[in-house]
Amino acid sequence: MSSLSSSKKKFTIYQLAFTALMAALVFVSTQFNIKIPLGMGVTSMISFGNIFCILSALLLGPIYGGLAAGIGSFFFDLLDPVFITSAPFTLVFKFIMAFVCGKIAYSGGHTADSHKRNLIASIAGLLAYIVLHLGKTFIANALLGSAFLPNLTTVGYSALPSIINAVIATIVAVPLAAALRLALKKAHFLDKLQPQH
């Protein structure tokens, strides 16, 4: 009984340590960005953060991947005066993005081992984030008194960087996850990161 308990505890420690590492990588990679002012006090950006959010989901699954994506992105927003008010939304939205991606990649008995499924998972997670982000932007602008058409225009402008981020994240994260999974498997570390079914 104690060996089983010890094994489960060790497994959880590996997951938590790798989750913290991935959250740090999300935070650092988001630092590499181009901010785009969209008017009405709205700023968007193109960054490498979503690559590591999706990578977290594909390596750690929906829960731990979601936590890494949400926490890393949350701390970036919290420490950037431009995005500080968005930090709580970012925590939730990035968690949902990675959760959706991880849930699909790890469903049906798969363990993010199918390139096609990972591609679909990545796109689904990123689309979920885009819908949440644009919805929040629209509602925030409406609450600030923006008329419908100008608000819709701002949301449209905000969609472009989001789509660019999604395309970059999908193109980079899916093959990178496959390469990292192979390296982690050879090092006998991958099985310690996989979510238990």
Image (cartoon, grey):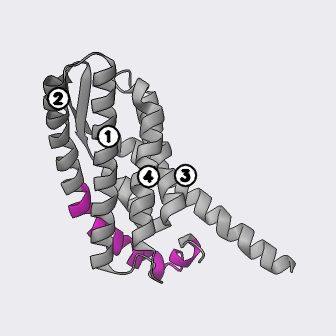
Residue 20 locus on image (x, y percent): 54, 51
Where 109 sits versus 151, above or below? below
* Tag shown at residue 133: 1
Disc nearer the start of the sequence (4/2):
4
Q: How crowded is mark 4: few (under 14 residues within 10 Å), some or many (20 or more)?
A: many
Is residue 119 positioned above or below 133 on the image?
below
Nearest to N terminus: mark 1 or mark 4: 4
Labels 3 & 1 near each other (Cβ < 8 A): no
Between the residue at mark 4 and the residue at mark 3, the CA separation in whole angstroms equals: 18 Å
Which residue was labeled with disc 3? 20
Please give the range of residues in magenta.
169-192
Residue type at mark 1: give it: His
Q: Which amino acid does label 4 sit on?
A: Ile
Q: Which residue is drawn at 44% across and 52% down?
A: 96
Secondary-structure class at tag 3: helix
Callout 2: few (<14), some (14-19), or many (20+) C-alpha neighbours within 10 Å?
many
Element type where label 2 sits in the image: helix
Q: Which of marks 3 and 2 is nearer the N terminus?
A: 3
Residue 140 x, y percent position in the rendering? 33, 26
- Dot 1 surroundings within 10 Å: few (below 14), some, or many (20 or more)? some
Q: Distance between the residues labelled 2 and 1?
A: 12 Å
Q: How far apart are marks 1 and 4 (CA)?
A: 11 Å
Between 141 and 98, the one lying in front of the other is 141
Q: Quadrant of the C terminus?
A: bottom right
The residue that disc 4 covers is 96
Contact check, label 1 and label 4, Cβ < 8 Å: no
Nearest the camera: 76 or 162? 162
Relative horizontal placement of residue 94, taking residue 131 as reference (left or right): right
**Which badge, 4 or 3, is on the more N-terminal residue?**
3
Q: What element carries label 1?
A: helix
Classified by dominant secondary structure, the portion drawn in magenta counts as helix
Which residue matches tag 2? 154
